[in-house]
């Protein structure tokens, strides 16, 4: 079913998943298109961002944000177009960045909506390299990781929208950069197209040994967004006073209990203590303010224009395909920043 001007499709949370979301977790519904009133505008979704944090919003466990309620449409950032407007500064046809979630249409009073203009060159990039993932990479690496020229930076999920950007910024700052990705194709992209010094396939049986060989001087900054065996391979290689920005743990998002195998708590906390490792978790828009965002937007625009940063995007057609695409993302089957062309 394609987008129309007659109904509003929504994908709602039907039940809370146990482990990986399945066909019963999300449900496609149709409702009437809402009507914008005085001081409001009607927005039509063009692109929907898919991001790992969405799995967390399906759970009712305590977190940094309220969970999606059963029967509510899924949360998410979108690039939308203005259909009608009674708001100064927003004209019909303008593209905007908004938090409308998994649906075709939404009414907005303009709060927390960014106008991208009538003809942005790459509107979907506001969901990726110029949006939350790019900003996460920039602020997490530079403000928490504080890389110095000549240091070794290791990046998990290196072919993804955050990891790919982290590594390229680290190269700009004069670091040796080692990526970790899943599969030969992703690793080749990371080295040949993004310019990392090396990339290790975490699916390899000798992953830990390969990572050690790629980091002969140890690891000074580890950008963590995976967890699992990738983290376990990094731990023995961390140098004294290493820094670890933590923005995600996708390997553990679908767990229903404690991980199998030995208790790694002593190894993790022992390494942090002995190596004096700085570990800081962050949620990008909670941890950093508008001044940091302006700095990011200015520098990233320049790096893109100069060809210093390269960006890969995976576009999925159709809102109805968003649930399956999100599972691909959670299972590491995506390649680049995933967006849905609604």
Image (cartoon, grey):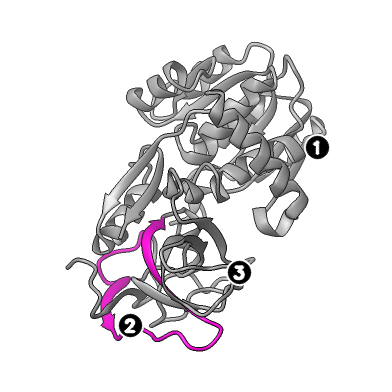
Instruction: Say which element carries label 3.
Output: loop
- x and y percentages locating residue 318 in the rendered image: 25, 59
Residue at x 41% of width, y 35% of height: 312
- The disc, 3 or 1, on the residue closer to the chain's N-terminal end is 3
Is residue 175 found inside the magenta-colored segment of the image? Answer: no
Is residue 30 found inside the magenta-colored segment of the image? Answer: yes
Locate residue 262 relative to residue 290 in the image: left or right: left
Residues shaded magenta: 20-49
State the count of labels: 3
Residue under pointer 2: 33
Compare residues 196 and 272 and report the one nearer the observer.
Answer: 196
What whole-number distance in Å separates the C-alpha atoms at marks 3 and 1? 30 Å
Residue under pointer 3: 65
Locate residue 90 relative to residue 8 in the image: left or right: right
What whole-number distance in Å separates the C-alpha atoms at marks 3 and 2? 27 Å
- x and y percentages locating residue 285 in the rendered image: 67, 57
User: Dot 1, how many residues are within 10 Å of its Cα: few (below 14), some (14-19), or many (20+)?
Assistant: few
- The disc, 3 or 2, on the residue closer to the chain's N-terminal end is 2
- x and y percentages locating residue 40 in the rendered image: 52, 81
Residue under pointer 1: 273
State whether residue 267 appears in this view: no
Residue at x 43% of width, y 68% of height: 92
Frontmost of labels 3 and 2 is 2
């Amino acid at each position: 079913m394609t987008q129309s001007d007659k109904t509003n499709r929504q994908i709602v949370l039907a039940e809370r998943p146990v482990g990986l979301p399945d066909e019963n977790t999300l449900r496609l519904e149709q409702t009437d298109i809402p009507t914008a009133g005085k001081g409001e505008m009607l927005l039509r979704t063009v692109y929907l961002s898919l991001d790992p944090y969405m799995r967390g919003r399906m759970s009712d466990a305590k977190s940094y944000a309220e969970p999606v309620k059963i029967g509510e449409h899924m949360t998410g950032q979108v690039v939308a177009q203005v259909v009608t407007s009674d708001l100064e500064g927003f004209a019909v046809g303008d593209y905007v960045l908004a938090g409308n979630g998994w649906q075709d249409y939404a009414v907005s009073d303009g709060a927390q909506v960014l106008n991208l203009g009538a003809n942005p060159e790459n509107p979907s990039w506001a969901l990726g390299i110029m949006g939350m993932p790019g900003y996460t990479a920039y602020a997490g690496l530079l403000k928490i990781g504080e890389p110095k020229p000549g240091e070794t930076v290791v990046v998990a999920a290196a072919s993804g929208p955050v990891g790919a950007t982290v590594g390229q910024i680290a190269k700009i700052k004069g670091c040796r950069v080692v990526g970790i990705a899943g599969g030969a194709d992703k690793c080749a992209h990371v080295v040949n197209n993004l310019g990392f010094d090396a990339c290790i396939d975490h699916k390899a049986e000798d992953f830990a040994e390969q990572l050690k060989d790629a980091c002969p001087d140890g690891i000074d900054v580890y950008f963590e967004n995976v967890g699992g065996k990738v983290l376990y391979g990094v731990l023995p290689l961390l140098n004294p006073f290493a820094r670890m920005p933590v923005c995600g743990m996708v390997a553990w998002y679908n767990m229903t209990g404690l991980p199998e195998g030995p208790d790694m708590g002593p190894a993790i906390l022992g390494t942090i203590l002995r190596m004096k490792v700085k570990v800081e978790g962050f949620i990008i828009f909670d941890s950093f303010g508008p001044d940091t965002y302006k700095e990011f937007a200015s520098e990233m625009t320049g790096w893109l224009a100069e060809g210093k940063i390269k960006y890969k995007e995976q576009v999925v057609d159709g809102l109805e395909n968003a649930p399956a695409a999100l599972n691909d993302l959670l299972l590491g089957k995506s390649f680049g920043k995933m967006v849905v062309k609604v």
